[in-house]
Image (cartoon, rainbow, N blue to C red):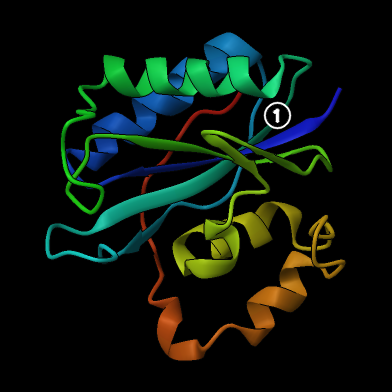
Amino acid sequence: MPRVYVAIGSNLEPERHVRAAVQALRARFGHLAASPVYACPPVGFEGPEFLNLVVAFDTDEPPRSLVRALKAIEETQGRRRDAPRFADRTLDLDLLMYGDEVLEEEGLRVPRPEILEHAHVLGPLCDLAGDRVHPCLGRTFRAVWAELDQTQRGLRRAVLEIDTQD
């Protein structure tokens, strides 16, 4: 079964929505590995700070089905699809990696480009999979993180306990 990495983010009642997302993922997929939770300012707009983390789990569920499941979890937490792309949100779940697959289809890109663009995705991913090699770059996530402009990192550890066990 492929190891899957999913980014979790929220800036509207983030503690509640992040915990609910972890609980829903755990209920569906079993044991999760989780990065620490980080706080960071929004990217592309003004608003409350986000809580972000990355979780990993093994599944044989196909990528498109997995993305549908993530969207359903977002919707149960009040995610609005009619909001602007850069706006406050109750919950954002993004499929970052699906094993070592490279997929470019309408509405599905894996590995997700944001891995290389945003510290709030790459930092937590490094905590879980720093020695894993990006399937397109051929470099570890830790190496990519080391090259990220220090001024773009903007992450700080948040104090939020989450339960990832069955």
| Secondary structure state at the residue bearing disc 1 | strand
Q: Amino acid at mark 1?
A: Phe
Q: Quadrant of the N terminus?
A: top right
Q: Which residue is mark 1?
A: 57
Figure quadrant of residue 86: bottom left
- Left or right of 55 on screen, residue 133: right
Residue 164 x, y percent position in the rendering:
57, 28
Work out whether 50 lies above or below 99: below
Residue at 79% from the left image edge and 16% from the top image edge? 60
Residue 149 vertical position relative to residue 96 in the rendered view, above or below:
below
Q: Where residue 153 sits in the image (x, y, percent)?
A: 45, 78
Q: Is residue 153 above or below residue 77?
A: below
Which residue is located at x 84 percent, y 60 percent?
133
Determine whether 147 is above or below 154 in the image: below
Query: Where does residue 76 sit, x and y in percent of width and height?
Result: 29, 14
Camera sees residue 166:
no
Residue placed furthest toward the left: 47
Q: Residue at x 29, y 18 (%)?
A: 75
Residue lying at the far front in this picture: please name it: 106
The one nearer the camera, 120 or 45, is 45
The image quadrant of residue 6 is top right
Q: Give the residue at x 29% y 65%.
A: 43
User: Is residue 129 found left or right of 86 in the rendered image?
Assistant: right
113 sits left or right of 81 in the view: right
Q: Which residue reaches farthest top?
A: 28
Q: Quadrant of residue 62?
A: top right
- Is residue 3 visible in the rendered image? The answer is yes
Quadrant location, the C terminus: top right
Q: Residues within 10 Å of mark 1 (few under 14, many from 20)?
A: some
Front residue of 147 and 124: 147
Figure label count: 1
